[in-house]
Image (tube, rainbow, N blue to C red):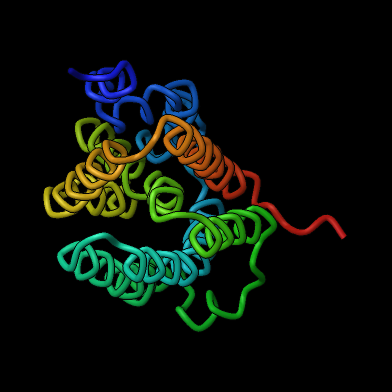
Amino acid sequence: MMSESTVTHAIRRPFSEELWDAIVPTYKAILDHPFITGLVDGTLPRDAFRHFVVQDSHYLRDYARALALCAAKAPTEDDVRAFASDAVGAIAAEQDMHSAFMADLGGSAEQAATAPVGPTTQAYTSYLLATVYGGSFLDGLAAVLPCYWIYARVGEELLERSSPDPLYRRWIAAYGDEAFQSVVRRVVALADRAGEEATDGQRAGARDHFVTTSRYEWMFWDAAWRREAWPV
């Protein structure tokens, strides 16, 4: 005979549904943000996009470290290989795509590397690394997941709208691309698998990390829109 706790565990919905439901207002705010709408209609100032590219270069270096730590804690050999590959991919994106964008913006990857790390970038990556270092695998996975999942959803949404600006169309295409979408589906499926084995309390803690880093995603685009700098 199944105990009440076993029945409750058995009928829980997929963890990914629980996670996404928790950030619906944040995701709507992202789609409505003038940085995102400016990508679509071509009105986003080049200075704002340059700020984003520079800060994203800084962000991805620490994000790669966070993914490598997820690989070290991953439950299966396949998961270890996948996260290790994603960490390499994050570095490759920083070196290739961002170098190309900087060249189009009249700069270079070297200039981006020497630009100051902004307040939001510093806060976001510090939170990510602290969570992945100090938390469980599920905590770390939940913390890194918004960067995968929100970008995939935004890319998918914007791909349907496109942009009159060829530079912004390239950015949209990179995240709306099926190759990136398939990677994200794999990580979301892993979140469901890991969440299924977790207690309700563990899921709640991981969900809090997911919500926090989703908010940081909004803040990252907002920082680029404002060309955020250290106030003192």
Residue found 55% across the figure and 51% down from its top:
48
Residue found 30% across the figure and 18% down from its top:
8
Residue 182 picture location, percent across and down: 14, 49
Residue found 47% across the figure and 68% down from its top:
57
Q: Is residue 230 left or right of residue 33?
A: right
Question: Vertical placement of 102 versus 148: above or below?
Answer: below
Between 30 and 12, the residue placed more toward the observer is: 12
Seen as rendered, the residue at the extreme bottom is 110
Residue 151 picture quarter: top left
Residue 17 picture location, percent across and down: 30, 26
The quadrant the N terminus occupies is top left
Question: Vertical placement of 181 versus 73: above or below?
Answer: above
Residue 157 picture quarter: top left
Residue found 13% across the figure and 54% down from its top:
179
Residue 148 picture location, percent across and down: 33, 49
Q: Is residue 176 left or right of residue 168?
A: left
Question: Vertical placement of 83 versus 20: above or below?
Answer: below
Seen as rendered, the residue at the extreme front is 1
The number of callouts visible is: 0
Residue 99 picture location, percent across and down: 38, 74
The quadrant the C terminus occupies is bottom right
